Image (cartoon, coloured by chain):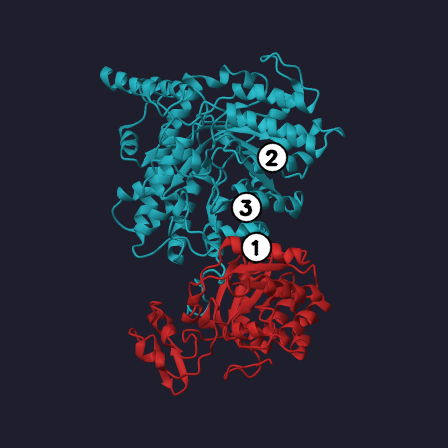
Chain colours: A red, B cyan
């Protein structure tokens, strides 16, 4: 299932394709977090909040033509080059990209990321790597976390990944050596709905949840509450059943769906109301989940 | 000198104002009467500097007859009782609270009400015995807190707690959070070793709900005040058993308006001239207070050793650093460009060096103390102290790193208000994390405003937005509500950009890549 795609320039897992950085975040794990968003995802969720992190630039060059300021160029076939000094962040390139990629990002050496984390280290409880799906850049990810773990000034930082749970067992075995925990999205409970909401099967995600719980590394399970999809009682009870069988006391976080930033496919749903979140919380708690937030 | 007609008009306006309570009218009348006296003698240049807004005495009045801020040594008062007030030393915690409640009404300050309630957990600690359960403490402090808010209705009145983590410290944090009152303002003196993470975490939980307490970097500040210190009013750190005669401030934005020539010339000529004019006004005010009003000769607080004249300093305030450096460096934004931060540093160093070396009469160690003044309601278009302009704030950590280097130069206090997005309420540990980082980088104190609370911080004091709304229709029982209402309107205060937003809710991310 895992697609360990490597950047063409990256021979040794020394380079990460970073979609963005949030040097302070209150919503990506306990305490203040330094968050790194890696580019690229193997799921294709219509409800994705950040669809421009899904694809990875294949150098097709469609964006070159819409960039009025010539901030994007195609010096050699297959490689889009970004000139940040010319960019006014209009977003046109993102809108025309046929692969939902972001041509303005460029590969970043792991060491550079580590240096930036060191600047922010006194202000945070830990580092969360999110995405996209961070485990797609497994070598770079392991390299980054190993560096943090082995640096006496940074080793105290808690290391978490925020993942869709698609990584296979071998991948987890490698990653578990360097992380403190994983926050996993379980987007639906019924196999059919999971496939519809992510484009992928549910079994590998459940496998990952079990493995992480076994190793005491399952930090949080998340449900994106979409009214009319994941909030009906049968679906919620089935969802609770899966999570309960993994670990009934694992922290569960309910996230409201937001239309803003999503692709047209998601426009049929409306923003999730606080009442819908409260209802879902009640159902999950009654179904035996002890730690629903 | 105003005409007789002007005076009667002003008095009539005060006496008939529907927006003032009885006591507020009384206080305003006293101010109007004081201002009938001529200003203490100053040169024509100093007079002009005041009229042009370069030097500002914060409308302290023409004839200072009480120090601006008084920080009595309450521990001594509790230990010895008071002959003047005919009070024996209290024998129990409840008696000690009664004792303080009486004493507070005899402490003068610029507001007419005390600005310092003491380091309450420290001074009340000796009265704690086994009979005091947490529940009983909470009930006592609930009563005490209600008393303070209802009888000393002014948000500049400030209680301190910490650095020791005691049952009283915890009780005060619980009660203060539950009541969400404007009074008292609250500062936690935090020491990583003495206080520990648990107490900081408890404070963070309170901040996430009610935007209090303010947190002071105790080990750092203590070094400047061997006699002890208190944090009072809007983040003024002052000597315990003393205080500040006066606070006169230099408006750096206005200072720039009276400058022509190079940056070099500003730093070597214009700025030192304006600093000296500020000192001249300060000195005239101190002389009047000490020599003419002779406050310190006629106060039982001095006679009973609760304050010591030699522990009074004067505060040299500055504000408008942001507008000054942006004016001197067209195209640069303070908080975003390193050149602006470097120039701010030069300006502050220049002022701080003069303040450290220039003698001031009747002051502790013969010196005034530098203070980054956090603003008053009338400061339209000028940013408080050395803060970054509202609306120009960089990302949270960059913001802290911009202002932290200035902190060591302001022994009498420097503040910044960091606006946080409401998601922090579900994750208060983040507030503790940011505080520890800020203190590790040398910040003396830190304050947060979390989005969506009714109780918000204005310059440093608190105001309830619901009170501001009510003030449109009727007088507020809290003296400072009017100042808060004006500040919110004049400064776009609630527009301070909340920092720290997760990608899940908003993809506005600083990108390592895009910064090129």
Q: Name the residue located 47 percent from the left edge and 33 percent from the top edge.
A: B367
Instruction: Kindly identify the residue that appears in the image at 39 percent across and 18 percent down.
Output: B26
Locate the N terminus of chain B by quadrant.
Answer: top left
Query: Which chain contains the residue that carries disc 1?
Result: A
- Asked if the residues shown at circle 1 and circle 3 are in contact, with their CB atoms under 8 angstroms apart, the answer is no
Badge 2: few (under 14), some or many (20 or more) residues near its Cα, within 10 Å? Answer: many
**SS type, badge 2:** helix
Tell me, for residue B175, which label it has, or none. 2
Under tag 3, what secondary structure? helix
Position of residue B507 measured from the top left corner of the image (x, y, whole percent):
45, 63
Disc 1 and disc 3 on one polypeptide chain: no
* Label 1 – label 3 distance at C-alpha: 25 Å
Identify the subunit bearing mark 3: B
> As rendered, which of B435 and B385 lies closer to the eye?
B435
The residue indicated by pointer 3 is B208
- Closer to the observer: label 2 or label 1? 1
State left or right for residue B194 relative to residue A199.
Answer: right
Where is B390 relative to B154, above or below?
below
Instruction: Give the image location of residue B441, x and y in percent.
Output: 54, 52
- Checking the image for residue B429, the label placed there is none
Secondary-structure class at tag 1: helix
């Amino acid at each position: 299932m895992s697609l360990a795609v490597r950047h063409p320039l990256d021979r040794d897992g020394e380079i990460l394709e970073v979609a963005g950085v949030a040097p302070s975040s209150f919503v990506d794990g306990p305490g203040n977090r330094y968050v790194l968003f890696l580019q690229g995802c193997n799921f294709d969720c219509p409800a994705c909040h950040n669809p421009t992190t899904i694809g990875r630039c294949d150098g097709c060059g469609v964006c070159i033509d819409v960039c009025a300021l010539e901030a994007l160029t195609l010096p050699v076939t297959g490689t889009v080059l970004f000139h940040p000094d010319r960019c006014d962040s209009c977003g046109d390139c993102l809108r025309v990209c046929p692969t939902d990629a972001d041509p303005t990002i460029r590969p970043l050496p792991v060491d550079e990321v580590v240096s930036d984390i060191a600047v922010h280290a006194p202000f945070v409880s830990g580092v969360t790597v999110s995405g996209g799906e961070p485990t797609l850049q497994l070598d770079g990810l392991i390299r980054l976390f190993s560096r943090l773990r082995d640096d006496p000034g940074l080793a105290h930082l808690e290391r978490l990944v925020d993942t869709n749970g698609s990584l296979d067992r071998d991948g987890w075995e490698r990653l578990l050596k360097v992380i403190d925990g994983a926050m996993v999205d379980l987007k639906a409970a019924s196999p059919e709905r999971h496939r519809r909401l992510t484009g992928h099967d549910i079994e590998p995600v459940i496998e990952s949840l079990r493995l992480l719980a076994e190793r005491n590394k399952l930090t949080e399970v998340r449900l994106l509450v979409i009214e009319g999809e994941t909030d009906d009682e049968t679906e919620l009870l089935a969802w609770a059943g899966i999570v309960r069988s993994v670990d009934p006391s694992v922290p569960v976080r309910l996230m409201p769906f937001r239309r803003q930033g999503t692709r047209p496919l998601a426009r049929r749903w409306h923003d999730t109301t606080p009442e819908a979140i409260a209802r879902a919380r009640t159902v999950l708690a009654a179904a035996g989940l002890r730690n629903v937030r | 000198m105003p005409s007789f007609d002007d005076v009667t008009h002003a008095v009539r306006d005060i006496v008939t104002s529907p927006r003032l309570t009885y006591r507020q009218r009384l206080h305003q009348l006293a101010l109007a009467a004081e201002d009938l006296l001529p200003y203490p003698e100053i040169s024509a240049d100093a007079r002009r500097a005041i009229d042009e807004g370069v030097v500002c005495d914060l409308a302290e009045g023409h004839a200072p007859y009480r120090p601006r801020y008084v920080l009595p040594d309450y521990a001594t008062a509790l230990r010895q009782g008071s002959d003047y007030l005919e009070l024996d030393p209290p024998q129990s915690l409840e008696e000690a609270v009664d004792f303080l409640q009486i004493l507070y009404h005899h402490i003068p300050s610029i507001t007419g009400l005390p600005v310092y309630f003491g380091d309450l957990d420290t001074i009340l600690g000796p009265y704690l015995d086994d009979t005091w359960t947490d529940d009983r403490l909470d009930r006592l402090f609930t009563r005490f807190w209600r008393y303070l808010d209802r009888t000393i209705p002014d948000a500049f009145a400030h209680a301190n707690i910490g650095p020791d983590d005691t049952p009283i410290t915890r009780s005060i944090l619980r009660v203060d959070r539950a009541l969400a009152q404007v009074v008292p303002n609250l500062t936690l003196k935090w020491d990583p070793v003495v206080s520990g993470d648990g107490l900081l975490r408890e404070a963070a939980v309170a901040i996430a709900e009610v935007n209090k307490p303010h947190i002071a970097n105790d080990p750092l500040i203590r070094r400047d005040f061997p006699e002890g210190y208190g944090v009072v009013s809007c983040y003024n750190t002052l000597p315990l058993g003393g205080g500040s005669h006066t606070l006169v401030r230099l408006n750096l934005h206005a200072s720039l308006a009276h400058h022509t020539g190079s940056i070099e010339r500003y730093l070597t000529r214009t700025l030192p001239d304006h600093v000296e004019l500020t000192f001249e006004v300060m000195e005239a005010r101190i002389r009047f207070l000490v020599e003419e009003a002779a406050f310190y000769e006629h106060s039982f607080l001095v006679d009973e050793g609760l304050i010591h004249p030699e522990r009074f300093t004067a505060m040299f305030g500055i504000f408008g650093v942001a507008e000054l450096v942006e004016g001197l460096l067209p195209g640069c934004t303070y908080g975003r460009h390193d050149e602006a931060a470097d120039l701010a540093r030069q300006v502050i160093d220049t002022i701080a060096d003069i303040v450290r070396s220039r003698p001031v009469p009747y002051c502790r160690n013969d010196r005034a103390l530098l203070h980054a003044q956090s603003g008053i309601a009338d400061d339209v278009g000028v940013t408080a102290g050395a803060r970054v302009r509202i609306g120009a704030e960089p990302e949270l950590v960059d913001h802290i790193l911009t202002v932290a280097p200035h902190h060591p130069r302001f022994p009498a206090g420097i503040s910044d208000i960091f606006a946080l997005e409401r998601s922090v309420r579900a994750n208060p540990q983040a507030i503790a994390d940011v505080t520890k980082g800020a203190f590790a980088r040398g910040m003396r104190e830190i304050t947060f405003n979390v989005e969506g609370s009714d109780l918000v911080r204005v310059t440093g004091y608190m105001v309830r937005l619901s009170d501001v709304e009510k003030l449109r229709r009727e007088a507020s029982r809290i003296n400072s509500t009017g100042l808060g209402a004006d500040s919110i309107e004049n400064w776009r205060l609630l527009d301070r950009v909340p920092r720290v937003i997760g990608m899940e809710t908003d993809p506005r991310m600083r990108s390592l890549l895009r910064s090129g």
